[in-house]
């Protein structure tokens, strides 16, 4: 089962209003609160990673050629609105009931993170552009799509499928202002550099009694322990934003689906700056075992 099919299955469980989420941190009600919470700034680098969707190898020369064609066309929206904040610490094995009382404040910076799929045809056209994981930054994903389409006007992208002897090539583009992603094992290209504000805020956290993830029936014959690590944006209402869900690690697709189904039903105290709730990335671990 693919990550996309898992996200589609979960989308049937919960409907999320992305535009409403993206407007939360920029609302006039919260603007003054966020400005007052600004304690410092951090230099950030937006990195672009490019991979083949079929798992095949893309040479460094081909990757650099395509990333340069994209980067030369990309322009971030102005002003660049940053509604989502970076994650706090990974949760521990025991997810105990937590409340807002006594929250400690930490410095967090906004985060841009998006994943996009597209196809390069032998004639150089770039088609089938899909935002797999939205950034929730207004206009950002649209600018990525525009840059990909504009890159096709150059004859260079067409050289890659021709050199590989294929009619079309399905690729994945990842854009992030977070740390370098060592899982990908490919060199990124610098998309832009900027200063992002550091804001003192309280992290999102699970609250109440959340459902346990069910041990998958089709794994019972093996009886092995399972581990899953999920990344998701918790919106300002305290709900997981399913379109932003990413599986960072999973023992098997069945364990991943079970963990994602449980997470979709979690309730959180949203991250907040004073009285202003804001979306935040959260990384959640799940463990499975038939042993007592």
Image (cartoon, rainbow, N blue to C red):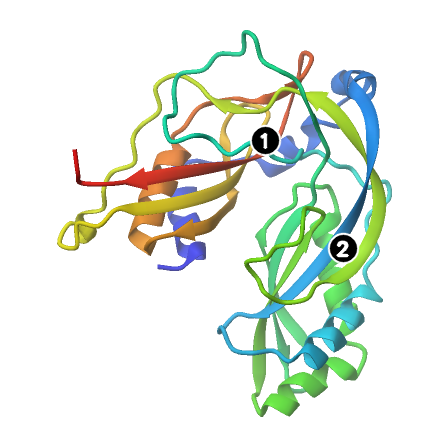
Q: Is residue 32 visible?
A: yes
Q: Nearer the viewer, mark 1 or mark 2?
A: 1
Q: How many marks?
A: 2
Rendered image: mark on residue 225: none
The answer to whether marks 1 and 2 mark residues whose Cβ atoms lie closer than 8 Å is no
Q: Label 1 vs label 2: CA separation?
A: 28 Å
Image vertical order of residue 34 relative to residue 263, above or below: above
In the image, residue 285 sits, relative to residue 226, either above or below, namely above
Q: Position of residue 226 (x, y in %)?
A: 29, 47
At 74% from the left edge and 74% from the top edge, which residue is drawn?
A: 64
The correct choice, above or below, for 96 with respect to 57 in the image is above
Measured as percent of width and height from the top left, residue 158 is found at 71, 84
Residue 290 image point, x, y percent: 18, 40
**Residue at (60, 89) in percent of width and height:** 164
Nearer the observer, 39 or 160: 39
Name the residue at 79% across, 84% down: 155
Judge the density around disc 2: few (<14), some (14-19), many (≥20) Cα neighbours within 10 Å: some
Note whether residue 124 is visible: no
Where's the N terminus, which quadrant?
bottom left
Image quarter of residue 143: bottom right
> Is 28 displayed left or right of 278 in the figure?
right
Which SS class for mark 2? Answer: helix
Q: Residues within 10 Å of mark 1 (few under 14, many from 20)?
A: some
The residue at which mark 2 appears reads as 143
Q: Quadrant of the C terminus?
A: top left
Image position of 181 (left or right of 287): right
First in sequence: mark 1 or mark 2?
Answer: 1
Q: Residue at label 1?
A: 88
Q: Secondary structure at mark 1?
A: loop
């Amino acid at each position: 089962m693919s990550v996309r099919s898992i996200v589609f299955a979960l989308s049937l469980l919960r409907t999320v209003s992305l535009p409403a989420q993206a407007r939360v941190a920029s609302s006039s009600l919260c603007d003054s609160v966020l400005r007052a919470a600004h304690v410092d700034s951090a230099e950030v680098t937006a990195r672009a990673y490019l991979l083949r969707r079929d798992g095949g190898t893309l040479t460094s020369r081909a990757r650099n050629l395509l990333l340069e064609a994209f980067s030369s066309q990309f322009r971030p929206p102005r002003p660049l609105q940053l509604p989502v904040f970076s994650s706090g610490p990974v949760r521990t094995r025991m997810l105990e009931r937590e409340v807002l009382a006594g929250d400690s404040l930490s410095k967090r910076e906004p985060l841009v993170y998006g994943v996009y799929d597209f196809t390069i045809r032998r004639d150089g056209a770039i088609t089938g552009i899909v935002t797999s994981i939205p950034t929730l930054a207004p206009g950002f994903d649209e600018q990525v799509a525009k840059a990909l389409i504009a890159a096709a006007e150059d004859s260079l992208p067409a050289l890659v499928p021709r050199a590989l002897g294929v009619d079309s090539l399905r690729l994945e583009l990842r854009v992030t202002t977070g740390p370098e992603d060592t899982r990908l094992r490919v060199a990124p290209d610098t998309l832009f550099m900027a200063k992002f504000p550091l804001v003192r805020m309280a992290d999102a956290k699970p609250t109440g009694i959340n459902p346990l993830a069910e041990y998958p029936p089709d794994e019972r014959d093996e009886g092995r322990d399972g581990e899953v690590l999920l990344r998701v944006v918790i919106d300002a209402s305290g709900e997981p934003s399913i379109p932003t869900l990413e599986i960072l690690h999973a023992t098997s697709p069945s364990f991943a689906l079970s963990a994602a189904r449980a997470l979709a039903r979690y309730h959180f105290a949203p991250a907040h700056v004073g009285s202003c709730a804001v979306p935040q990335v959260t990384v959640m671990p799940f463990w499975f075992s038939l042993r007592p």
